[in-house]
Amino acid sequence: MRRLRLHGLVLALILAACTTTTPDGTASLDQPASATPGTSDSPLPGQPYDAAALLTAMRESTRPGGVPDELETDALAAAMADQIWTWGGQPWQTLTAGGACGPADCTIEVAGSRDEMAGADLYTFAVDPASGEVTLESADLHGYPAELDASLDEMARAAAADEIGDLTFVSARWLPPPDAGRYWLAYRTGGEEGSPGLDLLLDANSGEVVERREV
């Protein structure tokens, strides 16, 4: 398959701690990341990885098949580094990269996590081998402090209690700039990801729900 399965790459974060990459000049891994959303002490997203760090991660990938050699270039790594943000600007404790090429284009996935986070961050890039163009296809970002879940749920219920009703909060994902401070919250019946429910875009700075999607 051209595309790597998301769950496989996230699982690899647990199994591939030896591939962790922390470039020089990044924030300390011991720096606290906790903060209350919507307050002045909330850390801003940052970009702790440079091209050299991502290139190393690609070359040292322990994913099956690793990253195709033709994708392991400084230019491609620099293009990805320009689009990768982490919550609070902290480097991940575990960084994993994987890639695959099809007849016309290639895909690279970069994932990272920290122990205290709610989940992993996953960036998926499409690469045009002919032009070298790199496009961010998706950013599925769950690498925020797990302790924020209760605060985010409380904010959303205060703003949209009637809509949420008896739905159960199951997950959240944070958004990078230019949407820093916003989170997509998933509410489902029975607490299951595949259940019918509601997705709410919460602006934690104002405490308002700014978009709604029925699932």
Image (cartoon, helix red, strand yellow):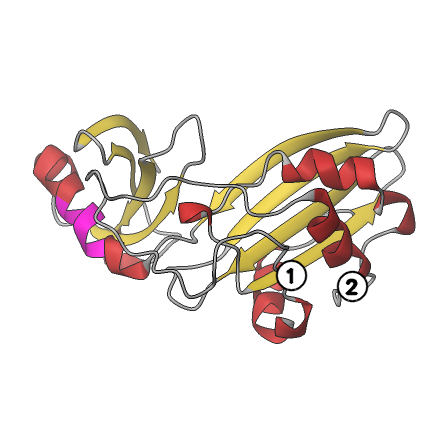
Q: Magenta stretch: residue 179 in it?
A: no
Instruction: Provide the secondary structure element on which disc 1 rests.
Output: loop
Tell which circle, 2 or 1, labels the residue nearer the N-terminal end.
Answer: 1
Across and down, in percent, residue 51 comes to: 72, 43
101 over 34 or under it: above or below: above
- Image quadrant in which you'd find residue 170: bottom left
Identify the residue under disc 2.
Answer: 60
Whether residue 101 is visible, yes or no, is yes
Magenta stretch: dominant secondary structure? helix
Name the residue rendered at 77%, 50% in the picture: 55
Screen quadrant of the C terminus? top left
Q: Which mark is residue 21?
A: 1
Looking at the rendered structure, the kind of residue marked 2 is Glu
Percent across and percent down for residue 62 are 75, 68
- Tell me: residue 83, above or below residue 21: above
State the extent of the magenta-drawn residues as a range: 149-154
**Quadrant in the rendering for residue 175:** top left
The residue type indicated by label 1 comes to Thr
